[in-house]
Amino acid sequence: MLKNELENGILSITLFDDIWDYDNPENRAKQWSFRRYTGIDEIAHALMNSRQCNIHDPSISIETEMACKHGGVRLITYYYNDNGDLVQKTKATKCKIYEFGADGNVICSSEEILK
């Protein structure tokens, strides 16, 4: 496992080298171990059942390669208000967009002002 600290204290964790080897039995075991260790399933279920969850008005949007304009495999958009707080899209005044390649590295990033 490879761990890198990114800006704003965000941790990037790489469980295996090739993102496309996710279905390899050894890599599946790593994924399940990580999920159990972080409790991510419990967090996801709690968020889905909370009143704050609105899948039609997200704070973070994750799209597949169909939305990527620079050859990436994932496009992640974060929505912020004027204070820099992560908010739902309908309350946002700006967004930060990151396009990731198959290796998990950022290919392109941008910031947009929303109307």
Image (cartoon, rainbow, N blue to C red):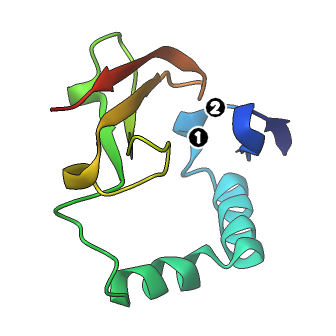
Q: Which part of the image, by quadrant, shows the N terminus?
A: top right
Residue at 77% x, 43% y is 9
* Residue 12 in sight: no
Front residue of this view, candidates 80 and 102: 80
Residue 70 position by quadrant: top left
Query: Marks 2 and 1: CB-CB under 8 Å?
Result: yes
Q: In which quarter of the image is residue 16?
A: top right
Label 2 Cα crowd, 10 Å radius (few <14 / some 14-19 / many 20+): few
Using a 10 Å C-alpha cutoff, classify the residue at mark 1 as few (fewer than 14 neighbours), some (14 to 19) or many (20 or more): few
33 vs 99, nearest the viewer: 99
Vertical side of 57 occupied by 23: above or below? above
- Left or right: where does residue 52 sit relative to residue 4? left
Residue at 39% x, 21% y: name it.
111
- Identified at 64% across, 31% down, the residue is 18
The label number, if any, that marks residue 18 in the structure image? 2
Say what amino acid the circle numbered 2 marks: Asp
Identity, as a three-letter code, of the amino acid under mark 1? Asp
Per the rendering, the mark at residue 21 is 1
Q: Where is residue 49 in the image (x, y as percent from the top left)?
A: 35, 89
Q: Can residue 31 be seen in this view?
A: yes
Q: Where residue 110 appears, x then y in whole percent? A: 41, 17
Q: Which residue is drawn at 25% across and 53% down?
A: 91
Residue 51 rendering spot, x and y as whole percentages: 31, 86
Where is 69 relative to 60, above or below? Answer: above
Task: Count the labels in the image.
Answer: 2
Local secondary structure at mark 1: helix
* Closer to us: 9 or 102: 9
Quadrant of residue 78 within the rendered picture: top left
Looking at the rendered structure, the secondary structure element under dot 2 is loop
